[in-house]
Image (cartoon, rainbow, N blue to C red):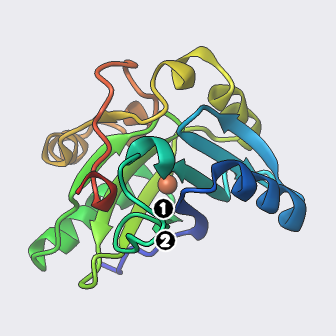
Amino acid sequence: MPRIRPARFVHVVYRTRRFDQMIQWYETVFDARVQYQNPVLAFLTYDDEHHRVALINMALVQPAATEADRSGVIGVDHVAYTYASVNDLLENYAYLKEKGILPYWCVHHGVTMSMYYADPDGNQMELQVDAFASSEAANDYMNGPHFAANPIGIEYDPEEILAQLRSGTPGSDFLMRKSDLPVSPIRGSIAA
Ligand SMILES: [Fe+2]
């Protein structure tokens, strides 16, 4: 079987203690627009991708930390790669599992079905599949009630989905987030 590769590189997420300034900077420098914003999260894009840059407001997530607490507190949170299908994402999961590489967070964000991996340095990689076929539909979702109800996502068991795929369930059955609850805790270094 040929190796499964990402279809494209799609976004970077930064942790910041200068939330408003950062939003303004990305709007100015990249001519980006805010797709979705709440006090903790902002998603920006400059083209038809649903987000190219996202910002996490660490002033609210970890109010006791300071700008000088470099490790895990400010900087790059994760980068993201989009795969062509749910089957690709899950078969790639199975391939990596055989190599002893496992995701630390499997979450359906609503707009993407995602798996987060850490490289040996702890850099976080989000491998994802787009839930929506068009960017218009993704944009509508991000501005609708389901995303507002849960902009983090709901966790899923990759083994369960892999088993269903291998027994013939079409991958497209998993594209839509089935419910808005429960809201997953944010995992990864920002939770450390
Ligand atoms: Fe992401």
In the image, what residue type sits under mark 2? Pro
Q: Please report the residue visible at 39 percent of the width from the left and 73 percent of the height from the top.
A: 4
Give the CA separation, mark 1 to mark 2: 5 Å
Q: How crowded is mark 2: few (under 14 residues within 10 Å), some or many (20 or more)?
A: some
Q: CB atoms at circles 1 and 2 under 8 Å apart?
A: yes
Judging from the image, what secondary structure is the residue with disc 2 in? loop
User: From what the image shows, is residue 136 above or below residue 189?
Assistant: above
Position of residue 147 in the picture relative to residue 191 (left or right): right
User: From what the image shows, is residue 189 above or below residue 163?
Assistant: below
Residue closer to the observer: 182 or 174: 182
**Percent x, y for residue 46?**
82, 56
Q: Please report the residue visible at 76 percent of the width from the left and 36 percent of the height from the top.
A: 136
Q: How many labels does the image show?
A: 2
**Percent x, y for residue 82?**
52, 61
* Residue 50 shows in this picture: no
Q: How crowded is mark 1: few (under 14 residues within 10 Å), some or many (20 or more)?
A: many
User: From what the image shows, is residue 72 above or below residue 138?
Assistant: below
**Percent x, y for residue 43?**
65, 46
Residue at numbered disc 2: 6
Q: Earlier in the sequence, mark 1 or mark 2?
A: 2
State which quadrant residue 180 falls in: top left
Q: Please report the residue visible at 29 percent of the width from the left and 61 percent of the height from the top.
A: 189
Quadrant where the N terminus lies?
A: bottom left
State which quadrant residue 177 falls in: top left
Whether ligand 1 has any atom under 8 Å from the Cβ at mark 1 is answered as no
Q: Please report the residue visible at 49 percent of the width from the left and 47 percent of the height from the top.
A: 59
Judging from the image, what secondary structure is the residue with disc 1 in? loop
Position of residue 122 in the picture relative to residue 5 (left or right): left
Position of residue 157 in the picture relative to residue 132 (left or right): left
Residue at numbered disc 1: 83
In the image, what residue type sits under mark 1? Tyr
